Image (cartoon, grey):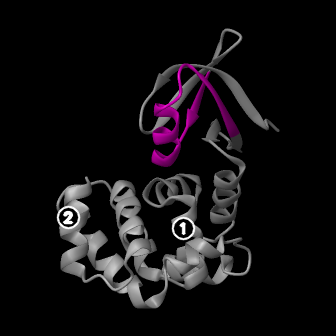
Amino acid sequence: MIEYIKGSIAEITPAYAVIDNNGIGYMINISLYAYEKLQGTQQEAMLYIYEAIREDAHVLYGFVDKRERELFMLLISVSGVGPNTARMILSALTPDDLSASIATGNVNSLKMVKGIGAKTAQRIIVDLKDKIKTDSSTLLSMTPANNEVYEEALAALVMLGFTQTMSQKVLAKLLAANNQITVEDAIKQALKMM
């Protein structure tokens, strides 16, 4: 089992990174979350690895921290969620947002991920609710009072063409500062911040 691969970034795209380690280039599938984190690095990177061994291929999945890898491994333990689906979920939701969504039973945030329907979202929540470790500050920002505002504003921003990850970060900041904000004000202020 490979724990991590450390080396220089030979190539990086939103879907994968090629890490050159002593003259060997490892193609590693990554999430958009990992891609954003790696964008800020110079040429040196370290990715924690999950290796999926199939009949026809050995596929590497890379993560910027152990928490992201743990969430990935929990997701693929759910019936009907494979490695690529888990990677899509981690591309659409940050590890904190995913943990909060599962802990609070927020089916709608999981349904926003391409390829995830209501049944799969519910199965993820039921199977992982007791296994997810959450940060209490993350849960405070996702209270039911502002959860509806968050979801509606997020859906509107994504429909306007902004990335889900960026929209989530901006809305989380807005709701942490003012949990009485309306959907309209949240969208207007988010547009100014982007």
**In the image shown, does 25 or 59 lie closer to the viewer?**
25
Under tag 1, what secondary structure?
A: helix
Q: Residue at x 39, y 56 (%)?
A: 165
Residue 137 percent location from the top left of the image: 59, 73
Would residue 46 be found to the left or right of residue 156 on screen? Answer: right
Q: Position of residue 60 (x, y in %)?
A: 64, 37
Q: Amino acid at mark 2?
A: Met
Q: Is residue 35 magenta?
A: yes
Residue 9 lies left or right of residue 166; in this view the side is right
- Identify the image quadrant of residue 129: bottom right
Residue bearing mark 2: 159
* Residue at 39% over, 84% down: 146
- Magenta-tinted stretch: 26-48
Residue 80, position as x, y percentages in the image: 57, 69
Residue at horizontal 41 percent and vertical 60 percent from the top: 169
Q: How many marks?
A: 2
Check the image and report above or below for 191 versus 120.
Answer: above
Whether residue 135 appears in magenta in the rendering, the answer is: no
Secondary structure of residue under mark 2: helix
